[in-house]
Amino acid sequence: IQKIKLAWQPATDDSGIREYKIYFGNDSLSTGSSATSYTLTNTRLSLNTMYDFTVRAIDLYGNVSSKSNQVFANTYVDG
């Protein structure tokens, strides 16, 4: 399986949240929205690999929050 779905609690900010940035391994990506879930697919993930994930919120002024708690997930071969 080369798909991992992440979900997190929404950040709060008086100006509002523009988007979230997800960090995993040596990579990162911007979600492009204030939605509090994101699914990473095989275009960004390798098989049989353990990943550590953190998330940061970016507000409407471009301020970046501190990193969230770290979580771990892995991709694996099914069948």
Image (spheres, helix red, strand yellow):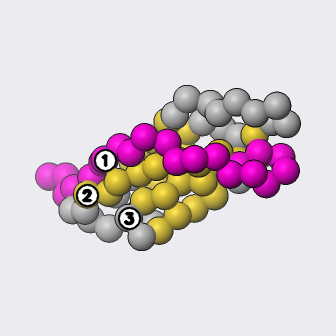
Residue type for callout 1: Phe
Mark 2 = which residue?
Answer: 50
Q: Residue furthest front?
A: 66
Mark 1 = which residue?
Answer: 72
- Mark toward the start of the polypeptide (3 vs 1): 3
Q: Position of residue 45 (x, y in %)?
A: 38, 64
- Dot 2, how many residues are within 10 Å of its Cα: few (below 14), some (14-19), or many (20+)? some
* Residue located at (47% from left, 68% from top): 27
* Residue located at (43% from left, 40% from top): 69
- Dot 1, how many residues are within 10 Å of its Cα: few (below 14), some (14-19), or many (20+)? few
User: In the displayed structure, does residue 73 sit left or right of residue 54?
Assistant: left
The residue nearer to you, when weighing 32 against 12, is 12
* Residue located at (85% from left, 36% from top): 15
Specify whether residue 41 is painted magenta: no
- Mark toward the start of the polypeptide (2 vs 3): 3
Mark 3 = which residue?
Answer: 25
User: In the displayed structure, does residue 52 sit left or right of residue 17?
Assistant: left
The CA span between labels 1 and 2 is 7 Å
Label 2 sits on a secondary structure element that is: strand
Residue type for callout 3: Gly
Q: Position of residue 4 (x, y in %)?
A: 39, 48
Residue type for callout 2: Met
Q: Which of marks 2 and 3 is in front?
A: 3
- Mark toward the start of the polypeptide (1 vs 2): 2
Label 3 sits on a secondary structure element that is: loop
Observer able to see residue 79: yes
Look at the image and give the residue range highlighted in magenta: 58-79
| Tag count | 3
